[in-house]
Image: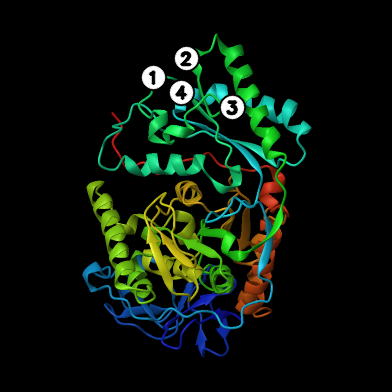
Amino acid sequence: MRLIRISSEDNVAIAVSAIEKGSRVEGFDLTVLSDVPQGHKVALADMKKGEKVIRYGVELGTVNRDVLKGEWINEKMIDLPMSPPLSSLRPGGKGVVYQNPPARKTFLGYDNGEGRYAGTRNILGIATTVQCTAGVLRIAAEKIKKEILPKYPNVDGVSALIHPYGCGVAINATDAYIPIRSISNLIHHPNFGGELMVVGLGCEKLTFDRVLSPEEINDDNVLVLQKCHGFSDMVAQICRMAERKLQRLNERKRTELPLSKLIVGTQCGGSDAFSGISSNPSIGRAFDMLAANGATVMFSEVTEVRDGVHFLAERCSSEEVVEKLRKEIGWYDEYLAKGGADRSANPTPGNKAGGLSNIVEKAMGSIAKSGKSPIVEVIGPGELPTKHGLIFAATPASDIVCGPTQLASGITLQIFSTGRGTPYSLSEIPVMKISTHTELYDMWPDLFDIDAGGIVTGEKSIDDVGLELYNMILDVASGKQSRAESLGLYNDLVIDNPAPIT
């Protein structure tokens, strides 16, 4: 197989591997007129200037010059169409509940009580109210890991929640609720087992009462560095507090729990033209299975769904959900406009090198991660979901911001799809990597948990990889380490902060 065509309406197909000029492609009755890189588009018919380029059965844009059948079509040859107007969004009842989901409906997790999601890991989370404490906390956290943690074998690790917020900010600005809500939810994350530990400096704007309830603000949970007698005392007090927490966390045990206690997120980064063919539809299939069996599954990335938002609206379960979708997407449209940017700023050079010509093409592949289930709720950045099923979380598309923002919304495991490759991970939850094509998997075999490349070559189906991923998700949620987790990889905790810095 040399070319992949997604829909019968498509007038372009994707090169499975690089194709040399003059190659004859049987089945499509064409001769390739120029060298075509892997993942890039080949015209299946002549096109006149201004004609639509169709992939996924959707208009990617119009060609800005005449194109011949067999020609390579790249990003410079396509003009963007208009985005779907938000006023046109309507629920369409097109969400489909997956039929006959897998019989496996439980996992081994750390129960946090009635009405709360379970932990997939048992971690001591040490949070800060301000970046000023970062240096001390990093040193203290390393000391805890080396000298204290080994005494508590039932605790999986220590995570320092160091973020670039807390002071030098307009703390009461209109959009300041986004980072503040995110930090508060991170402190209370399910993987931390209810053991709160927050280190402040003492003069910052983000005071304890903005992220903790009154009853949570006590000597067992909070520490002010400006009350300590020098650096050594700071580290000693952090370690003493940590040991009290570790003693309690060490008593926690995994128990068999229903999937209604599990919340999983997904994002993609370093995407390519195969993302929407292999890995992302496989994630969507696994998510459909999980949602049908009672789990909560979350997808995101506003600019990467913006050009397909009308398809999402048609799967929303009610007009109320659509209205929240309009609100969150509209907020982001205005946010980009204030910065003098628009959705066309999204595709990276790597995305384009991987065959993604523009944000419309990227959006259609990105949406595939959501599967076909009804969208039961739309939430803002760092907001907690209130329903089980498929959730759209309105986060930025940036990998290093989307992940922590989903984390703040409570996910306890994340699936990360990539076609170009990235070592991204988080220390607070297991992150599983899925490759879009086998060449990448073979290049980074110690970083990927699963390869969806067999779909590209026709050796596997989306159902095959979706079921494989479903079972692997439950294995990792039950304690099996992901590849990135076993390597100790993690990114900085970059929270979403659209509010002004003073």
Q: Which residue is mark 4?
A: 132
- Are there few (<14), some (14-19), or many (20+) residues within 10 Å of tag 3? some
On screen, 268 above or below 373? Answer: above
On screen, 232 above or below 74? Answer: above
Q: Earlier in the sequence, mark 4 or mark 2?
A: 4
Type of the residue with mark 4: Cys
Type of the residue with mark 3: Arg
The C terminus - image quarter: top left
Residue 161 position, x and y percent, is: 53, 36
Type of the residue with mark 1: Cys
Q: Which residue is mark 1?
A: 203
Q: Secondary structure at mark 2?
A: helix
- Work out how far the residue at label 4 is from the one at label 3, CA to CA, in angstroms: 11 Å
* Contact flag, marks 2 and 1 (Cβ < 8 Å): yes
- Are there few (<14), some (14-19), or many (20+) residues within 10 Å of tag 4? some
Q: Residue 138: which numbered mark, if any? A: 3
* Contact flag, marks 1 and 4 (Cβ < 8 Å): no
**Residue 64 seen in this snapshot:** no
Q: Which residue is mark 2?
A: 226
Q: Earlier in the sequence, mark 1 or mark 4?
A: 4
Q: Name which residue lies at 58% across and 45% down.
A: 426
The N terminus - image quarter: bottom right
Q: Earlier in the sequence, mark 2 or mark 3?
A: 3
- Foreground mark, 2 or 3, reads 2
- Work out how far the residue at label 2 is from the one at label 3, CA to CA, in angstroms: 17 Å
Q: Secondary structure at mark 4?
A: helix
